[in-house]
Amino acid sequence: MAYWKDVWEFTNSKEYEYKYAGKYGAKGEKRGKRKKATPEQIKRQNQSNREKKMRRLIKANFIPDDLWNTLKYPKGTRIPLEGVREHLKDFLIALRKEYKKRGEPLKFIKRMEIGEQGGIHIHILVNRLKNAQTDLIIQQCWQQGSVNHESIYEHGGYKKLANYIVKLPDEEMEGQLSFFPEEERKELVSYSTSRNLIRPEPERTEYRRWTVRDLIENGPKPTPGYYIDKDSIHYGVNPYTGMSYYHYTEYRIEEINSRSSPPWKEGTWK
């Protein structure tokens, strides 16, 4: 096999990943020498993979005006994790009922987080209802305190949100986690999703005779109706696998938004 191409297709963008041996993936070219990765390098690579997986999960299921919510307790309140679980369970039951009444499925990605004062709050991304004030409904269903809302676009886009959801605890958060039993710490730094999310998979094409010479020397050409984000173009050799790679993303010029007319400038939610 000379090389292969993976294409991840979403509503408003396509991501391309080429992997090949040697300079162009031509017949007879071999992969480079592989280096042994250090534990720190493996950790960084694993985190990068988690961020990429989450970004694609969000892109496959949500649009820029869907809501990223923070469910809060009154200031100074510290609810034990068991209590937070029960409150979250009640909230989701109530929210599902509201979505069901309107004939729409509830999709979500959620994670808990410890605040600066050591109290737990909940982050949850949900699909916005078509003909209802979703933010008011969420507040009505969360009866334990206030709710902050912002769209994916307002938060900074898919990439920034994905990185936040799967972020590793920093030194300050590690200190806060130390006050919780060990069996609870994992739950406080992980995420979970509704079962109805689409799990995106790429369309893979394998090539044996063609090479990526033209792609390397002249750059990628956009699909009609799309433009290529120049900052998304990355290529080189993975020192740990010895395989060469070429990545880029293209975006639909006229965004398709199935729930409302998009007021955003194209490409700003990368």
Image: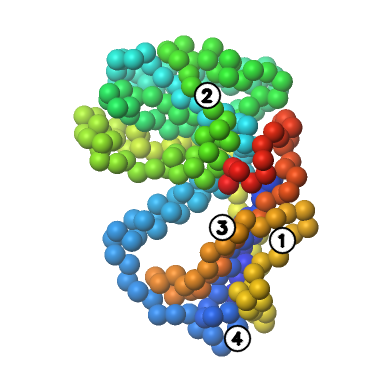
Residue annotated with mark 2: 149
Q: How far is disc 1 from disc 4 in space, using C-alphas?
A: 26 Å
Q: How is the image coloured?
A: rainbow
Q: How far is disc 4 from disc 3 in space, using C-alphas?
A: 30 Å
Residue 185 in sight here: yes
Image side of residue 255 versus residue 216, left or right: right
Q: Earlier in the sequence, mark 2 or mark 3?
A: 2
Residue annotated with mark 4: 27
Amino acid type assigned to the residue bearing label 2 in the image:
His
Q: Position of residue 237 (x, y in %)?
A: 47, 72
Residue annotated with mark 3: 231
Q: How far is disc 4 from disc 2 in space, using C-alphas?
A: 54 Å
Q: How far is disc 3 from disc 1 in space, using C-alphas?
A: 14 Å
Mark 1 Cα within 10 Å, few/some/many (few <14, many 20+)? some
Q: Residue furthest right?
A: 224
Name the residue rendered at 34%, 60% in the picture: 42
Q: Earlier in the sequence, mark 4 or mark 2?
A: 4
Judging from the image, what secondary structure is the residue with disc 1 in? loop
